[in-house]
Image (cartoon, helix red, strand yellow):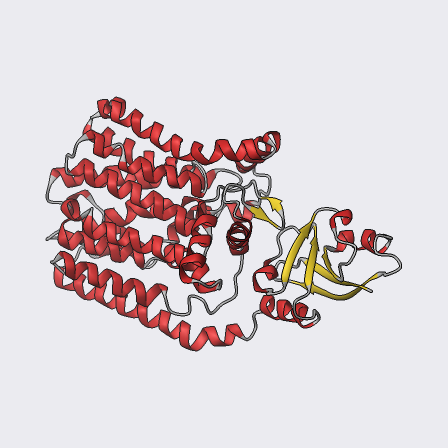
């Protein structure tokens, strides 16, 4: 594992073996529909400025992930789970590639490939990176910013390079989720600057230019978005997203108390090697200082974010990035020993190489076993696809379905009939024949005389994995 091309090939092969098998075989779940449906709406309407879910403006998250989903659909020419999830898995790959290219001069050939493999093969990234949820993209953008900043800093590049390219990535991170990633980026930056006593670097003009670039990238979307929508609603929604986490609106003590342990376990299986990260295992004083800085740079933001009342473990996933760098630094050292309380034995380079190869092989075998033996059985039990097929079976080909104030409905991704959204009954055409409504609005529709003498009546009720129901009414 020495040549740049060889390391790059290894990374791509391991990524393909872990992230591509059965990528599109399982139905969308969780929040995936909220990332996919706005992308579809953008392609249909040509409005890429205002994300929409169920015909209504979606204020809760910026649109970068929706743009990428729309781009993936456009590039591949089809809309399915595989193309929807490609932006996430490609984001993960870009981070691994940056480790073996950008960080190579800092970590060395051995350390850079190890960092890339740790990134690709940890529980948190495998779980989130194979879904089109925000974490795969947002954590990857934060990772890229940290890798570029730390690599340029270690290589003593120009301040204008150190403080600009990472901030372009941070600006994109704002467009993915908002400013939370800055806690983790500055956690590393401040820890490194503190250990090296180079506080003046923080007030270099290039740093302020970087901040302007970052804010400018977000403002380029946010300002036109606010102007095109209800400004008061946008401000209220964005404020509620932030303050709701601090207030702990959905606070559950039994879940909150496990935030930090859960966040640490995202690093599995590599978390078992954290006891190796000790000052005496680093030959160079410079590496000892950097290791201490990265330890604080990962630990402090992890604890701060996980202790927020409304937080959940995935919010602290960017802490995985300095952890990957730290473990890679440790594994590349010539003389490595376990602490005395674990026997104090030497952990030779050959033993480390065998261990890493073993983890790679086991992880790939586990993923292919999952794809071949487990996924087909899970596929037969996917409720959301069955519900969409049931709805479609009741509607003649070419018929338009009108969705009345539907909110977020994952089954819409699997419906091939033409969908039209309406906020109020008066917006549904007089000649409409099929109507999708939520249970709380059923009675209102049934009592309406809009389609007289025709009357609506229920022909199906579907309940998805969220225990949320939607009714199909026929007007005749």
Closest to the observer: 453 or 291? 453
Quadrant in which the N terminus appears: bottom left
Quadrant in which the C terminus appears: bottom right
Total residue callouts: 0
Residue 455, quarter of the rendered image: bottom right
Is residue 432 visible from the viewing direction of this image?
Answer: yes
Closest to the observer: 47 or 279? 47
Does residue 137 appear left or right of residue 1 in this picture? right
Does residue 117 appear left or right of residue 213 in this picture? left
Residue name at image x 19 percent, y 50 percent: 101
Residue name at image x 50 percent, y 76 percent: 377
Closest to the observer: 437 or 367? 437
Residue name at image x 32 percent, y 41 percent: 298
Residue name at image x 46 percent, y 64 percent: 78
* Rendering coords of residue 66 (x, y %): 48, 49
Residue 350, quarter of the rendered image: bottom left
Is residue 246 visible from the viewing direction of this image?
Answer: no
* Rendering coords of residue 327 (x, y %): 24, 50
Does residue 444 appear left or right of residue 52 in this picture? right
Q: Is residue 364 above or below residue 5?
A: below
Residue 294, quarter of the rendered image: top left
Furthest-right residue in this view = 453
* Rendering coords of residue 306 (x, y %): 45, 42
* Rendering coords of residue 147 (x, y %): 26, 43
Q: Is residue 448 above or below residue 12?
A: above
């Amino acid at each position: 594992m020495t040549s740049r091309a060889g390391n790059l090939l290894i990374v791509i092969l391991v990524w393909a073996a872990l992230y591509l098998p059965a990528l599109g075989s399982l139905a969308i779940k969780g929040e995936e529909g909220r990332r996919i449906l706005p992308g579809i709406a953008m392609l249909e309407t040509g409005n890429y400025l205002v994300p929409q879910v169920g015909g209504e403006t979606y204020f809760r998250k910026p649109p970068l992930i929706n743009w990428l989903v729309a781009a993936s659909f456009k590039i591949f020419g089809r809309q399915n789970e595989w193309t929807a999830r490609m932006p996430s898995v490609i984001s993960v790959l870009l981070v691994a590639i940056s480790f073996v290219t950008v960080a190579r001069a800092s970590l060395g050939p051995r350390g850079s490939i190890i960092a890339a493999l740790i990134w690709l093969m940890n529980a948190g990234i495998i779980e989130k990176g194979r879904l089109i949820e925000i974490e795969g993209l947002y954590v990857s953008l934060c990772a890229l910013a940290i890798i570029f900043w730390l690599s340029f800093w270690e290589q003593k590049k120009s301040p204008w390079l150190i403080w600009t390219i990472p901030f372009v990535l941070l600006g994109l991170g704002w467009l993915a989720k908002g400013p939370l990633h800055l806690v983790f980026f500055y956690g590393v930056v401040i820890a490194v600057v503190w250990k090296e006593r180079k506080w003046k670097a923080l007030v270099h003009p290039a740093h302020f230019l970087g901040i302007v670039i970052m804010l400018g990238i977000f403002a380029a979307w946010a300002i036109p978005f606010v102007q095109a929508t209800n400004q008061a609603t946008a401000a209220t929604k964005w404020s509620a997203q932030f303050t709701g986490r601090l207030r702990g609106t959905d606070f559950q003590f039994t879940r909150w108390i496990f935030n930090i342990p859960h966040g640490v376990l995202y690093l599995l299986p590599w978390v078992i090697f954290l006891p190796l990260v000790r000052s005496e295992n680093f030959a160079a004083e410079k590496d000892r200082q950097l290791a201490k800085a990265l330890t604080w740079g990962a630990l402090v933001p992890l604890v701060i974010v996980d202790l927020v009342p409304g937080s959940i473990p995935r919010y602290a996933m960017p802490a995985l990035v300095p952890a990957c760098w730290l473990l890679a630094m440790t594994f590349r050292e010539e003389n490595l020993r376990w602490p005395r309380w674990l026997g104090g034995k030497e952990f030779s380079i050959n033993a480390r190489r065998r261990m890493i190869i073993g983890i790679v092989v086991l992880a790939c075998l586990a993923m292919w076993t999952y794809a071949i033996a487990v996924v087909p059985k899970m596929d037969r039990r996917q409720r959301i696809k069955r519900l969409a097929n049931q709805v479609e079976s009741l509607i003649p080909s070419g018929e338009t379905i009108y969705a009345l104030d539907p909110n977020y409905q994952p089954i819409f991704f699997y419906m091939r009939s033409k969908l039209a959204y309406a906020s109020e009954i008066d917006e549904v055409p007089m000649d409409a024949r099929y109507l999708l409504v939520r249970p709380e609005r059923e009675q209102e529709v049934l009592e309406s005389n809009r389609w007289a003498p025709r009357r609506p009546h229920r022909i199906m009720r579907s309940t998805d994995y969220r225990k949320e129901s939607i009714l199909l009414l026929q007007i005749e």
